[in-house]
Amino acid sequence: MTIRLHDTMAGAVREFVPLEPGHVRVYSCGPTVYGPAHVGNFRSFLFADLLVRYLRYRGLSVTWVMNITDVDDKIIKGARAEGVSIAAVSARYRESFLADVKTIGMTMPDVMPSATEHIPQMVDLIGKLLERGNAYRTDDGSIFFRIASWPPYGRLARLDPEGMRVGERVDADEYGKDDVRDFALWKGPKPDEPSWDTAIGSGRPGWHIECSAMSMAYLGPSFDIHTGGIDLIFPHHQDEIAQSEAATDKTFVAYWLHCAHLQMGGQKMAKSTGNIARVADILAGGVSPRALRLALISAHYRMGLSFGDDSLQSASSAIDRLDTLLAALSSYRDDCPDDATLPALLDGAREAFVAALDDDLNISPALAAVFELVRELNRRIDARTISTADAGRATEFIRDLDRVLGIVPAADESLDTELQKLVDDRAAARTARDWAASDRLRTVLAERGILVEDTRDGQRWRRAD
RNA sequence: GGCGACGUACCCAAGUGGUUAAGGGGGAGGUCUGCAAAACCUCUAUUCAGCGGUUCGAAUCCGCUCGUCGCCUCCA
């Protein structure tokens, strides 16, 4: 079986074949660091994470690049409002982004290039477009891409350039474009804006050019996969294609993958709409990072995903179910012979899991395979038909699948001595059938985030998280 | 106005021509248990927005209607 992915350019699911056998090059549009990212942003980042994790799970080596946009109108505006440099603003929110990345269990991209550190690459690219006649200068020192010079313009979004509703909101005073549909590669210098002195003049880069320059710098003129939210299809990705392909005459990207929006209250989560939630807010509300992660990846990436208290609650319960199973497996002891049916059970689960994800990262059936396995393992634990070694094998199996999902708790660390003493005391109280003491210690431990449960294998604990 | 996606149980969400319509959450009952928690078992869509059509057979294909959302503008 092969991996199949939905390519926006083709408008269809296509079999995935890396340009270079065994190695996949992926570029994801990352955050603009003008404020803390919201979980809608993270849906798209986690979708890219899932893609990368799965490609690696399937034995492919992956080079993953995610940019950080650290110069743009919003950052400039924010910095001006605070009276600080754009570097101060972008550094602050870059840190906040990286902290969220860690919290939410997102794989660190191999390269996270910043726009301001790649001005020379952008200047080279713009210079090439000027030479080739795809770009022109205006009186204020700006440089625009002439879309009329590049016929395939509009194809990614299936928009007819002639029929585009343009002009309605174009800032008339902005620049003297030849055609309102042309987009800025370079913005001429303004007194209160950051500016770079370069071979193409002074000014600052337009938004789209950074992604072309940085993706090609790290992944070459043609690479495998480019990801982003559906809202980036037009104009951002269309513009990237135009400026890249006009400069290189090569196909820029082989597969364009776009994820649908996270919705809250029936609408796209967006700062402009005001219906946003941030990672820190949600965690402050008592939701575990793993539950948040699951809530954000639990639907197919091309489907709108409803987000809210219900989805978080549902994800939290699902996570608890997984945690409980792992705790049960870890404390399970039985000298019975190995369960002869276990290998087939695990193989079946893996096959279903892989078949689902091979199909354009269809995560719902993949999760179904995991939870069906959870039920089957719980049955065997209840019936005590698996051996101690089987329990270990099952744990290892689930942890292996979790290389893709990232929702399983860290392997059991030991408790600190104080908590361990409380746990031991409670076990002793139970042996002594001192239920009052046992119940009191259970409460004390729960307040410390340790849930104890009594089973045939004795008392076991897990972190409330 | 143009382009696109979607409408499956109380909620979320798979399934896209053919045995009993996945899975998660929630709810009801039961088993187990010092209690609790967990787990397990049973039940919770004769039906897939509506109406027509194609077919031996459709949630799945076609048409129309209704509804929701997104893109066309900064946006993950």
Image (spheres, coloured by chain):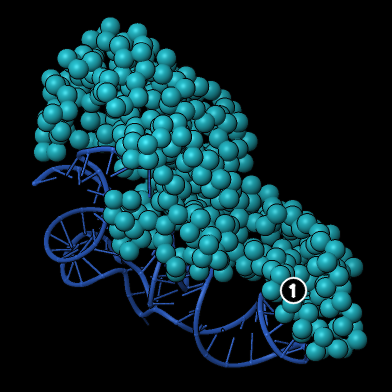
In this view, the residue farthest toward the front is: A83
Q: What is the quadrant of the N terminus of chain A in the image?
A: top right
Tell me, yes or no, if residue A371 can be seen here.
Answer: no
Pointer 1 chain:
A
Task: Name the residue at 15% across, 34% down.
Answer: A170
Viewer-proximal residue among B13 and A234:
A234
Please determine whether, in this image, residue A229 is positioned above or below residue A292: above
Please determine whether, in this image, residue A260 is positioned above or below residue A205: below
**Residue A449, image x, y percentages:** 69, 68
Badge 1 crowding class, 10 Å Cα cut-off, few under 14, some 14 to 19, many 20 or more, is many
Query: Which chain appears cyan?
Result: A
Question: Disc count in the image?
Answer: 1
Viewer-proximal residue among B43 and A425:
A425
Tell me, yes or no, if residue A102 can be seen here.
Answer: yes
Q: What SS does tag 1 mark?
A: helix
Q: Give the amino acid at mark 1.
A: Leu
Query: Which chain appears blue?
Result: B
Task: Name the residue at 48% across, 59% down.
Answer: A281
**Residue A321, image x, y percentages:** 63, 68
**Residue A314, image x, y percentages:** 50, 68
Q: Which residue is mark 1?
A: A445
Task: Name the residue at 33% across, 29% down.
Answer: A207
Q: Would you identify the image quadrant in which residue A422 lies?
A: bottom right
Viewer-proximal residue among A80 and A345:
A80
Task: Name the residue at 51% across, 65% down.
Answer: A285
**Residue B64, image x, y percentages:** 12, 59
Is A344 placed left or right of A361 in the picture?
A: right
